[in-house]
Image (cartoon, grey):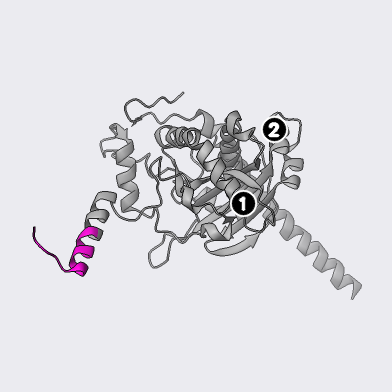
Amino acid sequence: MRAWLSLASFLGGIVMLTSACATSEEWSEWKSHNTHFASGDHGFFSLRNNRDGSNPRVSRSDVDAARQENWWGKAITVSPEQIFQN
Amino acid sequence: MPRYHPRLLGGLLLTAALVVSGGVSFAAAPEDALMPLEKYTTPKGKSLASVHRTRLLQFSEQIYNCLPWLSVHPGGLGFPRARDSQDDDRYLSTWIFVDQRDDPVFAALPQERRVSAMFSRYGVDMLRRMAGLPDVVDDDDVAGLSVVLSWLKPGTTRPGRKAVNETFALFVDKTTLREFLAKRVSPEEFTNRAKFTLFDGLDPVGRVPIEVWEDSFNSTYKASNYDPPKGARCP
């Protein structure tokens, strides 16, 4: 019985160490992306980027228009009442 | 003057309003970002909102014009109380949506690390910006500062799924924040003293273990192809 417990602890330790290492790598990669957005591109950033690689100017109204067309505002979000009292 | 049936007139007005507004949106124009005065339920709240309205509007315009990757929740800038507060403690608060897309690296992070990343990158900078409004923060009726961050939960924009936002809300007293920003309080102590909670969509997750580190992105990034509105000053 004691041998089984030791083996289980050993295997559990290996699993934890392995997952911790993987997470650490991902973590350090993310943290090193100081010049990037938190999760890749922002919606506005790729606005009007042409296929030829040119990068036309983007205005604030372009940003607003793009957000009307994608997920922005449509995602399920907690209501203010769950966080605040007025 | 032609006479319209009340329902028809109502429909026309609604249609006109939607056309003008562009439909329902989470992104708020600078003035819409301010919590409406009539929503405050106590004299202290109303007074704060009234006295500091101009300053908050300037703050809102700064975010709108200069940080286009962020947006303030409509009515998300003001002086609310924490939901579980028994007192009338008012917090200078900003609710920010972070505009971003799915990314495999970010998606691979456990939820509490996504929270840590978002708070370190955007939350701390927003708190610093709010702390930079001394005429507001030094008001004796302001108990502390609060920042709420919402971002798209990775993987929820796939076809057939409903997009979900993760939302992190933090409240901290003024002294702790000042000491933290001045590096006299460690990030660990800061998180120990702050009250915060996470929501997964509509579901409360509660307090999660977070790590806070320095991240200068939000204070230094300049979008090379973005033109702020005319007259906007973006330092």
Residue at the image position 43 percent from the left and 40 percent from the top: B69
Disc 2 marks a residue whose amino acid type is: Arg
| Residue drawn 49% across the image and 59% down it | A77
Q: CA separation, marks 2 and 1? A: 20 Å
Q: Is residue B55 visible?
A: yes
Q: Indicate the secondary structure of the residue bearing disc 1.
A: strand
Query: Viewer-proximal residue, A44 or B206?
Result: B206
Q: Residue B195: where, in percent of width, then height?
A: 69, 50
Q: Residue at x 48, y 34 (%)?
A: B59
The part of the image, by quadrant, that contains residue A46 is top left
Amino acid type, residue under disc 1 in the picture: Arg
In the image: residue B5, left or right of residue B32: left
Q: Nearer the viewer, residue A46 or B76?
A: B76
Segment colored magenta: B1-13
- For residue B5: magenta? yes
Give the prevailing secondary structure in the magenta stretch. Answer: helix
Quadrant occupied by the N terminus of chain B: bottom left
> Quadrant location of residue A49?
top left
Name the spot of residue B178 as percent of width and height, x first.
69, 33
Query: Which residue was labeled with disc 2?
Result: B178
Q: Chain of mark 1?
A: B
Q: Tell me what residue is drawn at x 38 percent, y 27 percent.
A: B232
Left or right: A8, with B174 as reference point: right
Above-or-below relation of B93 to B135: below
Q: Residues within 10 Å of mark 1 (few under 14, many from 20)?
A: many
Report which residue position mark 1 lands on: B81
**In the image, B74: left or right of B116?**
left
